[in-house]
Image (spheres, helix red, strand yellow):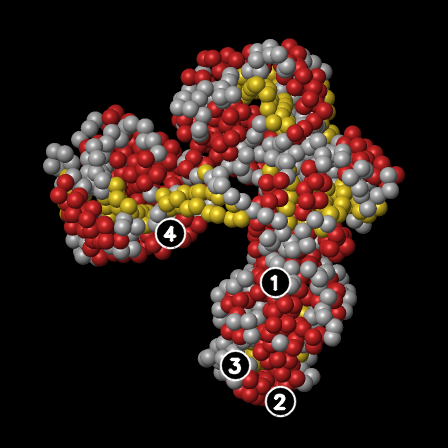
Amino acid sequence: MTLTVPTPLADAATSDAALRRFLHGLPGVDQVGAEGRAANLATRSIKTTAKAYAIDLAIRMIDLTTLEGADTPGKVRSLCAKAVRPDPTDPSTPSVAAVCVYGDLVGLARDYLGDSGLHIAAVATAFPSGRASLEVKLADTRHAVAAGADEIDMVIDRGAFLSGRYLQVYEEIAAVKDACGEAHLKVILETGELATYDNVRRASWLAMMAGADFIKTSTGKIAPAATLPVTLVMLEAVRDWRDATGTLVGVKPAGGIRTTKDALRYLVLVNETVGIEWLTPDLFRIGASSLLNDLLLQRQKLASGHYSGADYVTVD
Amino acid sequence: MQPTPFEYAPAPESRAVVDIASSYGLYIDGAFVDGTGRRFKTVNPATEEVLAEVAEASGGDVDRAVKAARHAYNRVWSKTSGRDRGKYLFRIARILQERAREFAVLETLDNGKPIKESRDVDIPLAAAHFFYHAGWADKLSYAGFGSDPKPLGVAAQVIPWNFPLLMLAWKIAPALAAGNTVVLKPAETTPLTALLFAEVCEQADLPPGVVNIVTGAGATGQALVEHADVDKVAFTGSTEVGKAIARAVAGTRKRLTLELGGKAANVIFDDAPIDQAVEGIVRGIFFNQGHVCCAGSRLLVQETVADEVVERLKRRLTTLRLGDPMDKNTDIGAINSPEQLERIRTLTGIGEEEGATRWSAPCELPDRGYWFAPTLFTDVSQAHRIARDEIFGPVLSVLTFRTPDEAIAKANNTPYGLSAGVWTEKGSRILRMANAVRAGVVWANTFNHFDPASPFGGYKESGFGREGGRHGLAAYLDVA
Amino acid sequence: MADRLEVRKTYKLFIGGAFPRSESGRSYEVTDTKGRFLANAAHASRKDARDAVTAARKAFGGWSGATAYNRGQVLYRVAEVMEGRRAQFVAEVAAAEGVQNRRAEAVVDAAIDRWVWYAGWTDKLAQVLGSANPVAGPFFNFSTPEPTGVVAVLAPQDSALLGLVSVLAPVLVAGNTAVVLSSYARPLPAVTLSEVLATSDVPGGVVNILTGAAAEVGPWLASHLDVNAIDLSGVDDPDLARELEKAAADNVKRVRRPASEDWNADPGMSRLRAWVETKTVWHPIGV
């Protein structure tokens, strides 16, 4: 049950067998218990001042995302405009953390965002399936970084993970991390395909051992995407990683978070699992698109005292 | 660090959903009547505010109630078909569901437990108990007690203050389903939801006298269980009072079931799902401020992981939110009474004197009301009183073991035997532990779960008889 | 007001929670026992039966996976809504069965009470039919009832409501889903029951009700490989019953043969036992 990372780390990451021994030695996750804990935290009641604070925090944590085959420069332009100024009627509304686009659109996003301070995240490594050669994945990554991405959202090879080729997954993450250079690396586990919480915990550790700056739940292309219990297990992993190494790794749930109520539940989860240290866009992000407008509607409601409507926020 | 940390603003449940009368009588024969005894006050333990004045039923009042129950039994209830008894119970279940928020608020005000628990646990479970037993009323011949099992008659029921409405449901639902009438005495510090339940009986058109509620303290309870015309006594409460009741009914025809104290072992093996185990420990001992007879008050941790478990547990306890029970975000409410608070203080004091190491979660206690911070003791040995006596509060004693046999020996080394917990990912070990532990309920990789379909009750000095499930019906049928 | 012209109801099939007409476009005339016109009922076809089986299969996972307590709540809710439709049921039963109102009231009351009786069984069935088995060895061994799957029910021809409820409700208790073919000549209470089911909390597809002929639809249900069991209570023709039972053997369906039944008698557990499988689990015991 020990959570000490073997030192040197390389000891565990020398073979599939060594990684298997380490990852399968992590404590199990009881499904009923984990889901019960997440459901219990979901009953927290966030009101008034706490709600106002949490809404702005959630906005600041959003990776505003468009990942469609039909994306165009026009779509990216409007996404960027929305990211910088989410609510044109209220200049006190904070900007989101980043925009998240496919690699070929990074250059455009960089042009639009200029020196706004917003980050540009690119999905890379043959997103969303990850089914490509390592060379292609690395080239994908380098291209996005060269075009101006300062955050890379990579996918792990779920096939390799599920068949126990842990070393391959590890080395691939490490290679992508290397290709990122200065850019931050978010490692997408695609928890919907990992199927068990035990796998989520193991994949979280594997990604952190290989150098992830963030671990991220999902591509958004597979159901289920982010869930509260999956995020709970990942938060427990970064907490234990901090205890073991002193290093802080971020967490990003993505996909399926559409309402303010959902977003607040994630913030509660962070607050009570890893504490306020993680309640910053540097360590917690929410990958979303439609969520932003619901946050804006709730923000307007808090400011005005009455309910707003969909015609009073911008479609992008 | 954040400029403004994420502090939860107060989120109080509205008190306006419930009307509390300034004064309550006794519910006898379908009507509220004045008692002939003195009156006493029931207070909100979180604020010390007086909520209402309640009648202390005298011996004469108890006699009236028993007579009403006998009359209703003879004239109406024993002739009511199982199908119709079931319909009344279904109605009661539905009314409890409909008025759930009202009951939750009243329970929290009178008891001090967090609204989150009364809302999500006590009241839904109480309704579920009525719903479940409603279905049995016309199926008793399938319950395994012969083709036409008969009720006992009039049941005298005395319940505790830790789950007032839920304990009422555990008592009244099976009694009525089986065809008995009842006289129930709620605890003196928590009478209000039982009195509100009388209104539910009226809305359900339950025939007068089938359910009678007499309020009062020990003397009222004694008069009730000693009344010559009750056929059945059911008691939930302390082992000490349980023994006195057992003596009192000795030599009579009265049937008896007792659900008494406990000092449950919660056993954590080193292959446990550790994050869930920590949650289970918290749920085991800090649920309902530890006012739970089956609480996991003795933590037995395998030595290989003891330090790690305790460290994680302490970290978790610092996130517990103690305070206003009416706040929807409160995890730990008020201690139910000054007497109970004094008992907890005394026993924890003894724990320190005997050499155990005390640690309490850093939380601010409100100025008014009765409060005790979540506390754990390490360096506890089997000989310490905090490892033997039921504290009935938010206090955990941590002991260690090396082998499964040692865990079993320590778990069983108590006069109690109500419940136990086992945490391990190894299925065969769960079953071995479950076989070896002398306790009426064993939770594996969970703790403090309750269900109307699941029999609950103790071994040894934790009492006898079961409540819930098919087995619980036996307590109210003439099948002994 | 006595001569107000009533707004009549269209009687349709009930498949997957929706109310379609027969895909065949056919209907047939329903009359009272004196031959007076009551309504045109949809005449279900083989394809309607196929669609109903698909819907029942789709609903099986959710319904069988719901907690027994939840199924009990849902089924009790059906009884509550039936009570609210009591007058309509009484009128339809009286017309269908040619009985006086008082007799029809008694039938409807019995039908509602029967539903309540079965609603109470959901969370007791395993306690009565299950067991812990003391095997000779270090093993924990227990047996529990589980639902058979999709059950086709050919409902009684005579008792249009009480008979229907008596054969349908026990199918649902353990978590089976049902495709019901109602009484041919007396289908209207069945359609009204489907409207009750649609407005209770019963998930769509758990119960599918067809109106039509057993001789036409029955063989398709009996031979359907995705149907796990079939109740032949409504098959009055012994030759047809034998043929259907033979067809059912192709995928080893559980079959309940037609028998003369007193729908007013205590139903007992026999219909509950008919639609469950027993699962026994072994697990070693050791440290």
Residue A185 tag number: none
> In the picture provided, is A110 more to the left or to the right than C54?
right
> How far separated are the C-alphas under marks 1 and 2?
31 Å
Q: State the CA–CA distance, disc 3 to disc 4.
A: 38 Å
Chain of the residue where label 1 is placed in the rendered structure: A
On the same chain, marks 3 and 4? The answer is no
Q: Secondary structure at mark 4?
A: helix
> Position of C189 compared to B12: left or right?
left
Q: Which residue is mark 1?
A: A231
Disc 2 marks a residue whose amino acid type is Ala
Question: Which circle marks residue A126 in the picture?
Answer: 3
> Local crowd at mark 2 within 10 Å, few (<14), some, or many (≥20)?
few
User: Is the residue marked by circle 1 packed among few (<14), some (14-19), or many (20+) residues within 10 Å?
Assistant: many
Disc 1 is placed on an element classified as: helix
Extreme right residue here?
A: B353
Whether discs 2 and 4 lie on one chain: the answer is: no
Q: Say which amino acid is labelled 1.
A: Thr
Counting residues from the start of the chain, the first of labels 3 and 1 encountered is: 3
- Mark closest to the chain's N terminus, 1 or 2: 2
Where is residue C114 shown, x and y percent of the image? 34, 32
Q: Distance between the Cα atoms at labels 3 and 1?
A: 24 Å
Read off the chain for label 3. A
Q: How many numbered circles are shown? A: 4
Residue C189: x and y in percent read: 25, 39
Q: Is residue B104 left or right of residue C186?
A: right
Q: Three-letter amino acid code at disc 3?
A: Ala
